[in-house]
Every structure is written in C-alpha cells, then in structure tokens.
Image (spheres, rainbow, N blue to C red):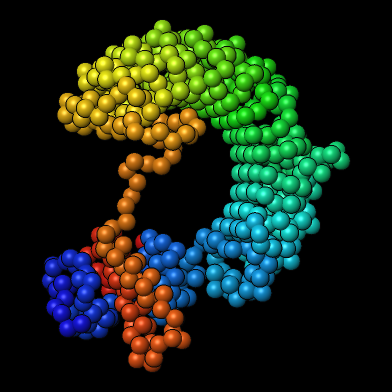
Amino acid sequence: MGQSSSISSHSPGSSQRFTGPAYKTEISPYNPSFGNIDYISEIPDECLAIIFQFLSSRDRNQCSLVSRRWLLVEGQSRHRLSLSAQSELLSNIPSLFSRFDSVTKLVLRCERRSVSINDDALLLISLRCPNLIRLKLRGCRELTDVGMTAFAKNCKGLKKLSCGSCMFGVKGMNGVLGHCSSLEELSVKRLRGSNDGGAAGELINPGAAASSLKTICLKELYNGQCFQPLITGCNNLKTLKLLRCLGDWDRVLEVIGNRKNCLVEVHLERLQVSDAGLIAISNFLDLEILHIVKTPECTDAGVVAVAERCKLLRKLHIDGWRTNRIGNEGLLSIARHSTNLQELVLIGVNPTSISLGAIASNCVKLERLALCGSETVADEEISCIALKCVALKKLCIKGCPVSDQGIEAFAWGCPNLVKIKVKKCRGVTVEVADWLRARKGSLVVNLDVCEVEAEALDASASDSGAQDDAGEVPPALSRVTVAAAAAAAAPLSSIGRDARQNHNLLLREVGCFLVLEILYVGGYGDLKRLENMRIP
C-alpha cells in the first residue's frame, strides 16, 4: 500500500495504453491512477460474462465473491458444472441450480466408498436443468432404470451421455434412447445393470435416437452383446469404439458391413474379433481411422482386406501384441493401396526394410509414424525411412534395436521433420541427440535412454492428444490465482473485524485484477474503450 502504481493515469483523448498491473499496488476501482472513474462497474454484464469464460473454475469462484452483481453474472453465465454426487447433494439442489440456472453441461461424480445420489435427486436436477445437452455420470450406483427414464423425459434435448460404474440396466438405457431424439454421442463403461438385463434376453434398441446417434463407445462390458441392436440400428453412425468388451464381435461387424453404413472411425481393443470381423470392416467404404489393438486372432489376411477396399484410410494403429500374425504381407498391402495414409502406428509388429520402404515410397502423405516394441526395426530400417519419407513430420521410436548410426540419417533425410522422439533405445546416446539438434536447429529431439521402469509399450504420433503448443496461462494470471487462493483459505470466523474487512477488500481487488488482466491479454488495453464496449 502506498507504492506508486504501474497503471498510468488516463485522460480523454489520450492514446496511452494499459501496460499491466503491479501486484503490490492497491488496486481499487477508485484508485486515483484511474482518474476517479469506476471502470469495473462500467463493464456491461454481457462483457463481464465473456471475461469470466477465460477464467478457470477456481478463479470464477473467487470473482463471484467480489460483489452481488458479479455473483449473479458469474452464476448465470456458467454453462459447465461438476458436482460431487453424494447423497447429501439432494438437499442443496434447489439453491444450487437457482444460482447456476444456465447449466447445459453437467458432471456428477461419486467416490467408490460414498453413497451416491438416487433417482429423486436426478429427477430434481432434470426439472431444474431442462436445457441440459451433456451429462456425465461416474459411480452413481444408486440410480435405477426408473430414475434414468424420468430424467430422459425432462431432458429430451440431451446430445451427449457418458456413464461409468453405474447400476441401472437395459431398461434405463432404453428409456434414454427412447426419449432423447437429439442424442449424438453415447459412452458406456462398466454398466453393471446390463449384465442382468442381458441374461433375461433384453436388448438395447436405438429408439428415437436411431437417426441422430453418431458415436458409440463401449468399454469393459461383461455383456456388451445386448447393445447389438443399437449398433446395427443407427443409420448415421460414424464412430464405433469397442474396448475390452467380452463376447464374439465378428457377427456384429458382419451385420453392419452387410448394409449401407457411413462409419468413418472404428476402434477395436482387446476384443474377440478375427479376420472375419476385419473382412466385414472392409465393407466400410468411408472408413478413415482404424485402430486394431491387441486382437490376437487378426492376421495379415484381415489387414489386406481392409487395405484393398478402404481407400480413404488416413490413420491406422496396429498393436500386434507380439503375436507375429500381422507382418510384411499386411504392411505391403497397406503400402500399395492406402495412398492417403497420414498416420501409422505399429506396436509389437515386426516390419522389415522391404515393407517400411514400400510404405515410405508409396504413402507420400505420411506425416506421423510410430514404431514401438519391434525386434526388426534397426538402423537399416530407420535409414530407409529417413531416405524415403519426404512428408514425415513426427516420428516416435520406442523399444527398438536402433543405434546412433540410424538416428544420424535424419540429419540429411526427412526435410519436413519437426519432432523425433526416441525412448528405450539403448543404442542411442545423448551425444547423437545433441549433434542432431545442432545439425537441424528447427528439429525437436526428445531422447529418453535412462528410463528403466516397466511400462506398457504404447505410442501415438497423433495430433489428437495433448498438443505441444497448448495455450499457457499468462504469468500475471498465475500470480493472481495464488493471491486469490490465499485470500480464500483464511476462515473468516477466526479473524477479527478489521481483518475481515481487509480479507473482503483483497477478494474484491483480486477479482478486479483478473478482469483487468483478461482485458489486457485480449487486446482491450485502452481503458477508455471500456466505457463504450458492447457485444456486437
């Protein structure tokens, strides 16, 4: 307090811009440095709501303590809400959703050892949130078929449902599909109640969602076969993910393949699926993305069938699980027919320089390549990739017998390469990594040769995961967040009247800091513009 502010005074007609706050300065809306104008109060509610969208949930909570107006605007502008779905939540639902009355995306998560919300709580939520479009349920074991059906009747605009470790069954799922005609994405994991439903011969049908459903993801289901009518009955299904589900899935894939379909993406992981299933997938003529992960009954014959007919294939992931049933024959067919391939991940597969050379030469659009856990990928194969893969941008090599000699080839090859990752290749040294960085200054080289802990061989060079250039929070915002957390941590009951006043003042100033920082980062440095700022 009392120190000079880093925010210069602003007079009408001045072109001076806001250059950022000084964090040890008293920032009050009536600070003389602002020319005795309360710019914070002049911000319209619409603009304040947009500013709040740039803040994390924790920072929004701090801003809501600044004033009653900010509390109201923050609550009305919050569309995402994540709650601990314990049974005690029931009594708080009316007041909670009176404040957050615009929620469209809701997460209800209950810990394993706690008692979750029941049907009454879910029904009350559906009445308070009739515009809900996304719902995620985790560990809500007290929900039954009756509660899910009642919820679906009140939230017919639901577009995405994700449920895991819940106890409702086939009737509850049919209730959702029968009433939510706009449902586009369905993700189900460990649905306990479906086990009993399947034993009684009950099946899950597409219902009103037959035309709208575009994505189905089933994980770790004991009786996933009860979803067969749903999968085969969705006319516009584009993405199908079957992960670690028991039962024979060849028949399901054959039914889909024998009719007109528009499937673009298929994931098969740890399933009982054979070449018959892959041959059925070869009838998915619009297929662009295929993952075949740890399916030991799949061989080169199935891969050849897919490569010959699925001409639009862009991304292919194969985890052979070291069974050696998918090898050169399948990869050579990919090289001949999959000319649009952009991403290839081979795990536990043993290609040779012949198949890799053919892929590098014919797949001229290949930009991302990962080779993991292969006993045959050595310096010769890596040199072949460096010589022929002209379009390659990202390369991952893991657990392969590669040495410095193979890595050195990238100093002259792969002109478009921007990132190379080498992991668990004991023949590669730190020196060659430093040498490669010096030779190609723009190339990012990640080398990990010291890692010895056991872990599953898995890799993906895809851009769909965490981005390398993800946006960072400005340092100034980080410091404000720390200040806000410190302010909120002190219990008001344990401090005196003067201290409480200082505590409230700090919370208000922290909220002002956050708003000013967002305005500055977003290009609203000229404080004069705040007076006339409106939503277009």
- The residue depicted at 73 percent of the width and 38 percent of the height is 222
Q: Is residue 425 left or right of residue 24?
A: right
Q: In the picture shown, does residue 366 fall above or below 19?
A: above
Q: In the picture shown, does residue 40 fall above or below 378?
A: below
Q: Is residue 19 left or right of residue 284?
A: left
- The residue depicted at 38 percent of the width and 34 percent of the height is 451
- The residue depicted at 32 percent of the width and 52 percent of the height is 472
Q: Nearer the viewer, residue 319 or 506?
A: 319
Q: Quadrant of residue 534?
A: bottom left
Picture coordinates of residue 15, whole percent (x, y): 13, 67
Q: Quadrant of the C terminus?
A: bottom left
- The residue depicted at 32 percent of the width and 56 percent of the height is 473
Any part of residue 166 in sight = yes
Q: Quadrant of residue 271?
A: top right
Picture coordinates of residue 137, whole percent (x, y): 63, 54
Spot the residue most to the right: 200
Spot the residue most to the front: 452
Picture coordinates of residue 87, whole percent (x, y): 68, 67
Any part of residue 37 in sight = no
